[in-house]
Image (spheres, rainbow, N blue to C red):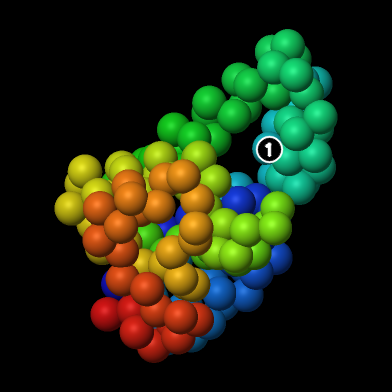
């Protein structure tokens, strides 16, 4: 199966480990980028970019240009895939956190009739009804449930 991993960049290390496990089970897997181009054309680690973006008030053009580019590229990865796996770990005091960007990726997958897997339970957040509505398959950490 072709699978695109979705989730907060804060979970990138965990996504990398999941990618390796899924590939060992003969799946093809795509992740968000490991690096992104800064304002000078130099490649920087995605986690450094994430930190810069979180500190920016929305006024640094190159940061938000890269955000748009990254979102579009990841939507294309969702389109490529047979399914997405949302890596929803705990973050910001929320068990099974799913942020706005990940919710948008889930919506794209839903619209394209892709399978949507959640690594962990649906979080208690404002968008819980929308998450339930896209009918994800909750695998409770068991990657063997991805079929």
Q: Disc 1 designates what residue? A: 36
Residue shown at 55%/64% (left/top)? 96
Drawn side of residue 144 relative to residue 82, left or right: right
Q: Count the numbered circles shown.
A: 1
Location of residue 94 by image quarter: bottom right
For residue 48, above or below residue 65: below
The C terminus: image quadrant: bottom left
Along the line of sight, the residue nearer the viewer: 8 or 27: 8
For residue 9, above or below residue 90: above
Residue 69, given in percent of the width and then of the height, sits at 53, 28
Q: Secondary structure at mark 1?
A: strand
Residue 138, given in percent of the width and then of the height, sits at 37, 73
The N terminus: image quadrant: bottom left
Residue shown at 78%/23% (left/top)? 56
- The answer to whether residue 71 is seen in the rendering is yes
Drawn side of residue 2 relative to residue 86, left or right: left
Along the line of sight, the residue nearer the viewer: 16 or 110: 110
Residue shown at 49%/35% (left/top)? 71
């Amino acid at each position: 199966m072709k699978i695109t991993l979705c989730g907060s960049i804060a979970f990138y290390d965990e996504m990398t480990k999941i990618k390796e496990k899924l590939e060992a089970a003969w799946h093809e897997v795509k992740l968000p980028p490991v690096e992104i181009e800064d304002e000078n054309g130099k490649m920087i680690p995605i986690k450094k970019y994430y930190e810069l973006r979180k500190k920016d008030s929305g006024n640094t053009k190159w940061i938000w240009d890269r955000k748009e580019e990254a979102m579009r590229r990841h939507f294309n990865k969702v389109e490529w895939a047979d399914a997405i796996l949302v890596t929803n770990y705990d973050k910001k005091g929320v068990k099974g956190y799913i942020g706005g960007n990940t919710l948008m990726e889930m919506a794209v997958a839903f619209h394209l009739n892709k399978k949507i897997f959640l690594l962990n339970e649906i979080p208690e957040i404002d968008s819980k009804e929308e998450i339930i509505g896209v009918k994800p398959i909750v695998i409770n950490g068991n990657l063997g449930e991805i079929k």
